[in-house]
Image (cartoon, grey):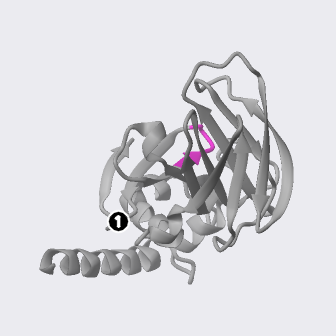
């Protein structure tokens, strides 16, 4: 317990110090990174069926979505619905019915060329995390649970922790008062990555297309992996 408290104190101090020292002029490095988030997941629903599992990641992203190291100021809501089938599928499109708080909608999910048996679509919604959500697919009705409600580390805290870990790399991208990079915050689910738990994954991409990532525990904020 004492070790956890000490870690939390040191982390808070480092965040404050770096925020003032690295960017100055009243703009902290964390604030700058938050402003330059090209994709930020805040709410995450998840469920496992008999022959598939499904997730919905909802938050905010840049309107013109390109991984190019530059983040548009204009942002839009997103709710990325993902279904992964456990059996090989030759289909290119899946039809799914989603019920959110009693309202039913139909969606067409396209197969991802870079992931086996994985289908996705953006429902273009802003989920608060309080919704009751279920979906109908392959003859099965599946209730999705808001996993992010269980996270001790929310999206804001995850960005702060990741910013501290990648502070040197991020400040190398600085162009005057501009960040010169864009950030992405997503959830790694246990099914897709063979983990027992879920994790935050923060990635920063600069204009030279170099990327750096940090994997963070949703339980205690500890850093599990750094890719540089």
Q: Nearer the viewer, residue 70 or 138?
A: 138
Which residue matches tag 1? 219
Q: Position of residue 195 (x, y in %)?
A: 36, 43
Residue that protrudes farthest toward the front in the picture: 139
Q: Residue at x 65, y 61 (%)?
A: 36
Q: Nearer the viewer, residue 179 or 186?
A: 186
Left or right: 200 as drawn, with respect to 84: left
Left or right: 99 as drawn, with respect to 166: right
User: Can you say whether 93 is above or below 46 in the image?
Assistant: above
Instruction: Specify start and end residues of the magenta stretch as a single range.
Output: 204-209
How many numbered marks, from 0 up?
Answer: 1
Residue 195 included in the magenta stretch of the image: no
Q: Position of residue 61 (x, y in %)?
A: 72, 57
User: Can you say whether 211 is above or below 12 in the image?
Assistant: above
Residue 206 included in the magenta stretch of the image: yes
User: Can you say whether 92 is above or below 214 in the image?
Assistant: above
* Residue 156 visible, this orientation: yes
* Residue 77 visible, this orientation: no
Q: Nearer the viewer, residue 105 or 112?
A: 105
Q: Position of residue 87 (x, y in %)?
A: 57, 22
Q: Residue at x 52, y 71 (%)?
A: 156
Quadrant where the C terminus lies?
top left
Quadrant where the N terminus lies?
bottom left
Give the secondary structure at mark 1.
loop
Q: Position of residue 116 (x, y in %)?
A: 58, 24
User: Can you say whether 81 is above or below 10 in the image?
Assistant: above
Q: Residue at x 71, y 50 (%)?
A: 135
Q: Residue at x 69, y 70 (%)?
A: 131
């Amino acid at each position: 317990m004492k070790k956890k408290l000490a870690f939390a104190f040191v982390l808070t101090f480092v965040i404050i110090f770096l925020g003032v020292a690295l960017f100055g002029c009243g703009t902290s490095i964390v604030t700058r990174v938050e402003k330059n988030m090209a994709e930020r997941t805040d709410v995450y629903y998840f469920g496992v069926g008999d022959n598939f599992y499904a997730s919905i990641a909802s938050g905010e992203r840049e309107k013109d979505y390109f991984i190019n190291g530059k983040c548009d100021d204009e942002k839009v809501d997103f709710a990325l619905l993902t279904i992964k089938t456990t059996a090989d599928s030759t289909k290119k499109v899946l039809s799914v019915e989603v019920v959110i708080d009693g309202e039913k909608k139909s969606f067409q999910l396209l197969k991802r060329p870079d992931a086996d048996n994985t289908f996705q679509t953006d429902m273009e919604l802003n989920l608060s995390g309080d919704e009751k959500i279920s979906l109908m697919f392959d003859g099965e009705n599946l209730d999705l649970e808001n996993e992010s409600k269980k996270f001790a580390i929310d999206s804001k805290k995850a960005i702060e922790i990741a910013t501290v870990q990648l502070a040197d790399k991020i400040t190398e991208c600085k162009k005057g008062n501009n960040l010169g990079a864009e950030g992405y915050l997503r959830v790694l689910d246990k099914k897709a990555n063979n983990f027992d738990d879920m994790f935050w994954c923060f990635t920063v991409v600069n204009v030279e297309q170099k990327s750096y990532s940090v994997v963070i525990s949703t339980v205690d904020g500890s850093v599990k992996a750094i890719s540089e």
